[in-house]
Image (cartoon, grey):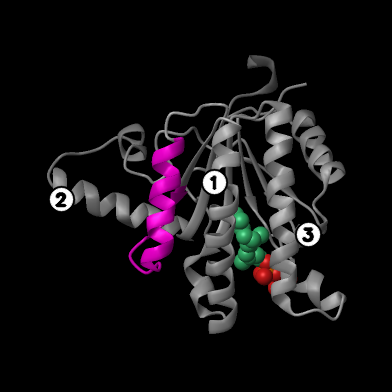
Amino acid sequence: METPTHIAIIMDGNGRWAKKRFLPRVAGHVRGVKRVKDSIEQCLEFNIKYLTLFAFGRDNWKRPQEEVSFLMDLLLEQINKEFTKLHDKNICVRFIGDRSRIDKSLVDRIESIEHLTQKNDKLFLSIALDYSGTYDITQAVNKIIQLSPKTAISEKDFSRYLLSYPYPSVDLFIRTGGEYRLSDFMLWDLAYSECYFTTKLWPDFDKTVFCAAMKWFNSRERRFGMISEQL
Ligand code: FPP
């Protein structure tokens, strides 16, 4: 079975999962954490090297303040709780996104876990926080302008300035929750991704759904602009 090298996921449907159970929306996020852990385990089991999770988008600041605070606190709590476990599993953790608006206590913990796990290489886990694909491309352009304003640049050179660098582009993109859009996630990195959409809500994203996505990926013919006969 051919496994993807890099999986990226929009973990959608937490709020609806909670609403269906007459629970507050944040209960869905708590349940979602369990599925984050399950997905990490699945990646370790399938020997998938790169996993990127969209934890908080730039547009998510528009949510009610209590939900934003809850999500930030949940992340901080999870980093504190899972810190050594992730390290023991030889997982390299990093966060991609704009850190300027994130609380200093969370940024400090993010930097500690990144530092602690930087040499690990079993799985490269990226958490997208205050991230968007358009932000990523814009910050890359701004870095380039500062460095060499008059030099033309190739696609390959441009990609070195993206937040995902030096990780490979995404092979399999998964979105749960029954929405069929990219919501400004990894626009450059998804250029040739196979896109798997499921109506399952993120808190229901168990091993069966993960395996279904993997099986579906395996059935795809990836031509990258060529024709079947050339592969
Ligand atoms: C989208 O569902 C989910 C989020 C914006 C937050 C995702 C966060 C987690 C799964 C928990 C923390 C993550 C980590 C990495 C520890 P939604 O709230 O938009 O659901 P809805 O569409 O049903 O309202």
Q: Nearer the viewer, residue 69 or 105?
A: 105
**Above or below, comparing residue 208 to residue 44 in the picture:** below
| Whole-percent x, y for residue 199 in the image | 82, 59
Magenta stretch holds residue 127: no
**Residue 95 numbered mark, or none:** none
Which tag, 2 or 3, sits closer to the chain's start? 2
Q: Nearer the viewer, mark 1 or mark 3?
A: 1
Residue 41 lies in quadrant: top right
Which residue was labeled with disc 2? 146
Label 1 sits on what residue type? Phe
Q: Nearer the viewer, residue 227 or 47?
A: 47
Label 3 sits on what residue type? Pro
Q: Nearer the viewer, mark 2 or mark 1?
A: 1
Magenta stretch holds residue 96: yes
Which residue was labeled with disc 1? 83
The answer, for residue 81, to whether it is visible in the render is: yes
**Above or below, comparing residue 136 to residue 93 in the picture:** below
Tell whether label 3 touches label 1 (CB within 8 Å): no
Which tag, 1 or 3, sits closer to the chain's start? 1
Give the residue furthest to the top.
230
| Whole-percent x, y for residue 132 in the image | 47, 59
Determine the main secondary structure of the stretch shown in magenta. Answer: helix
Residue range (magenta)? 95-117
Which quadrant of the render holds ligand 1? bottom right
Q: Residue at x 49, y 32 (%)?
A: 168
Q: Residue at x 55, y 68 (%)?
A: 73
* Residue 113 appears left or right of 55: left
Badge 2 local density, few (<14 within 10 Å), some, or many (20+)?
Answer: few
Q: Distance between the Cα atoms at labels 2 and 3? A: 43 Å
Which residue was labeled with disc 3? 203
Tell whether label 3 touches label 2 (CB within 8 Å): no
Q: Secondary structure at mark 3?
A: helix
